[in-house]
Image (cartoon, rainbow, N blue to C red):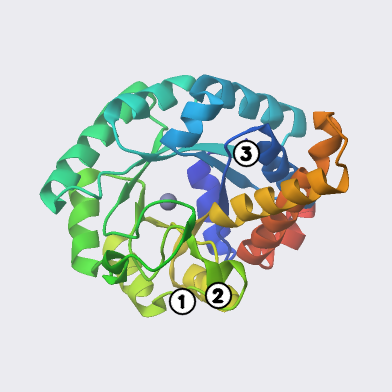
Amino acid sequence: MDALRTVLTRLEKEGAALGHFNVADLVLLKAVVGAAADIKFPVFVGASEGERGFFGTRQLAVLVKSLREESGQPIFLNADHTHSLASAVEAVKAGFDAVVADFSALPFAENIARTKEAVETLKGINPSAFVEGEIGNIGTGSEIHESVQSASRILSTPEEARQFVAATGIDSLAPAVGNMHGMLESMVEGKTKKRLNIERIREIKKAAGIFLTLHGGSGTDDGDFRNAIGAGINIIHINTELRVAWRKSLEESLSRQPGEVVPYKILPPVIDAVKQVVSSRLKLFGGQSVGQSAAAR
Ligand SMILES: [Zn+2]
């Protein structure tokens, strides 16, 4: 399997981005990997500290390794939003390919110091570990929110990006460019969409000169996604959309089979529903290169 950097560079040349999808259990993992395998396209599986706590850090790493070997697909594993060095180290030691070292809630200078320490420590354990840093505030919680958290309206600046990248040695930068964690009810209903500042992405890409990650992608306008990729976004995180599909389809499956107690009869429709969301996002982010993948790779 090609390294994550190699895949990201190739996708960038093709005008595509790598889809990142969070998993908290085997149902979600099967959906994410199944969708990628169907269209033979690389995928990034992510688990935050909360998701790893539920799944088991080492257990998730072993499952992904097994799925990767069996499918022959490029499946990368990311320790999403990691707020302590200890849990970042645990993930890299367990075999995770990448870590999001998220100290963005701290003052800028401290964010730099803690992120730099994480980069040095993690690459000391595994030189090919891919480390992402975060600047700005895009709100917390991949959930349904009642209102937009006001701090998430402030955009990261190119100068912050330049300084942060130069001082930390990160592989990818996650800025605040109009994106937001979680979704509003109106976004779940499809009545409103998140809008991104494409020009700011372009400026940050130029200043940072490295891979860029877009967090909080759920509920974003499709056209903005494509333009953001054109402006320099390499990785796109989707979590809430999967969670919404998971819950809705689980409720439907249970109400369709009121007397059923067999998990492997209740859960397959849930996997299918989440898989559909992942598949449509992978195709959107992959653009032209999705069709080519089977023949070229
Ligand atoms: Zn995120």
For the residue marked with disc 2, what is the amino acid? Answer: Asp
Q: Is residue 100 left or right of residue 296?
A: left
Front residue of 70 and 83: 83
Q: Is residue 134 left or right of residue 110?
A: right
Viewer-nearest of labels 1 and 3? 1
Front residue of 180 and 231: 180
Q: Quadrant of residue 173?
A: bottom left
Q: Residue at x 59, y 74 (%)?
A: 222
Q: Residues within 10 Å of mark 3 (few under 14, many from 20)?
A: many
Q: Relative to 193, is 184 above or below?
A: above
Q: Relative to 73, is 196 above or below?
A: below
Q: Check disc 1 and report the residue beneath it.
A: 195
Q: Which badge, 1 or 3, is on the more N-terminal residue? A: 3
For the residue marked with disc 1, what is the amino acid? Answer: Arg
In terms of secondary structure, where does tag 1 sit?
A: loop
In terms of secondary structure, where does tag 2 sit?
A: loop
Q: Is residue 278 visible?
A: yes
Asked if marks 2 and 1 touch (Cβ < 8 Å), the reply is yes
Q: Check disc 2 and report the residue beneath it.
A: 221
Q: Which badge, 2 or 1, is on the more N-terminal residue? A: 1
Quarter placement of the N terminus: top right
For the residue marked with disc 3, what is the amino acid? Answer: Ile
Q: Residue at x 43, y 26 (%)?
A: 91
Q: Residues within 10 Å of mark 2 (few under 14, many from 20)?
A: some
Q: Is residue 191 left or right of residue 49?
A: right
